[in-house]
Image (cartoon, coloured by chain):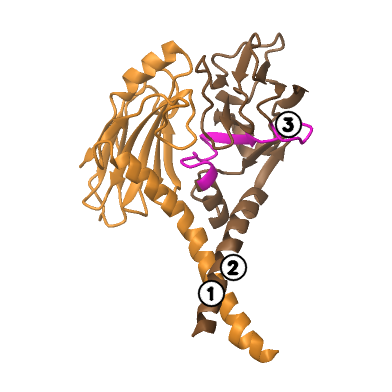
Amino acid sequence: MMRFFTRILLPILLIAAVVHAAAVWAVPRLVMHKVIQAIDQHGGPNTVYHAPQATAAARTIPLPSPDLLYSTCALDLSAGPVEVSVTPGPDYLSLAVFDAATDNSFVTNDENAHGQPIHLLIAGPATPAPSIPQGATLVRLDTARGLLLLRGLAATPELRARNDAARHSLVCRRQ
Amino acid sequence: MLRALAILIAGIALGLGTAAAAISQLGIGSAVQIGPWQTPIDAGGPGRGAYLRAAAALRATLALSRQEAIYFRATKDSQGHPLRGTCTYNIHGPDLPARWWSITLYGADHYLIANPANRYATASVNATRTPDGGFAITVSPTPHPGNWLDTARTENIVLLARLYQPHPDAAAAPAQIAMPSIDLQGCP
């Protein structure tokens, strides 16, 4: 019995514990890798992509809201920080930054901006103390890859027109 | 050699199986249940545990942190029966405590359901209101006046309620939010 435990059961349990932990760790990273890879196809990293409004036939991000306009920028911070700016209109518009493990590391919106442009400097783990432009907010990511996601309320034709104009002010570029 | 290989395969299978079960069960286990609606305490925030992070990556990729948005998912009606696209449901309740909200209908694959009107959701900014300021939405394969979401007879359906910029008391205590009822009206 003891021999069965030490030679068979214990090794199986040890391997299972390692595989279990690795799988739970890997799932969000694999999902995000796939998402970033898909968005990279729209112009490459650190490039703004204005996705069409989601329908049954087309979606850019998983589980999209059909009431929102989405714009994306697949972040690659390995060569230095990325500057992001957008000028919201009077309607709901948010900017969210996700790391490579799907964590929503930062989010802000039009109300927080009080009618002013939103200006971010997004830096990766390898960037030593970047110079922050005046008025910008520094966002630190633990990973070199990540995703910027703009959401703009577009539940009516009027909202859609206003937020489509607002999202086209989005800039995402290497500092 | 053969025994070592068998041990390795058994260990990997057990590890993957328990990981899948734990992501499914522990991810859900940390959720708040209000009637048929279920929400993780914080779908997108960096303070999530490993299991919730993995569960949210699979079910709610790119979810925002709780201060910005709260997500409620329903796969059953208020009586606990699975939602079916061949049936008619009445979703009704008070206005939701957020800057704006929406309720979206998906298939079980989390894709929007194709329908002639291209209408996939009802939002607070375009919903027809009830006299008390609340709302009622009919989810049905047949046309209805007012707020109607067409199931197109999709067999299994999922409802997702999104509350953007939830009011501070709602963000602080999502379990106290008065979520709408999902009442079965009839099946063919």
Tell me if residue B2 comes above or below residue A100 in the rendering.
below
Q: Which residues are magenta?
A: B58-83
Residue depth check, mark 2 versus mark 3: number of the one nearer the observer: 2
Q: Chain of mark 2?
A: B
Subunit bearing disc 3: B
Relative to A161, is A2 on the left or the right? right
- The percent coordinates of residue B79 (x first, y second) are 79, 32
In the figure, A26 relative to A17: above or below?
above
Residue drawn at point x = 46 percent, y = 41 percent: B62
Q: Is residue A162 magenta?
A: no
Q: Which residue is mark 1?
A: A15
Residue A74 percent location from the top left of the image: 31, 41
Read off the residue under disc 3: B77
Q: Earlier in the sequence, mark 2 or mark 3?
A: 2
Horizontally, residue B40 falls left or right of residue B188, namely: left
The residue depicted at 55 percent of the width and 13 percent of the height is B126
Please tell me the numbered disc located at residue B14: 2
The verdict on a common chain for dots 2 and 1 is no
Query: As drawn, is A9 to the left or to the right of A32?
Result: right
Q: In the image, what residue type sits under mark 1? A: Ile
Outermost residue toward the front? B2
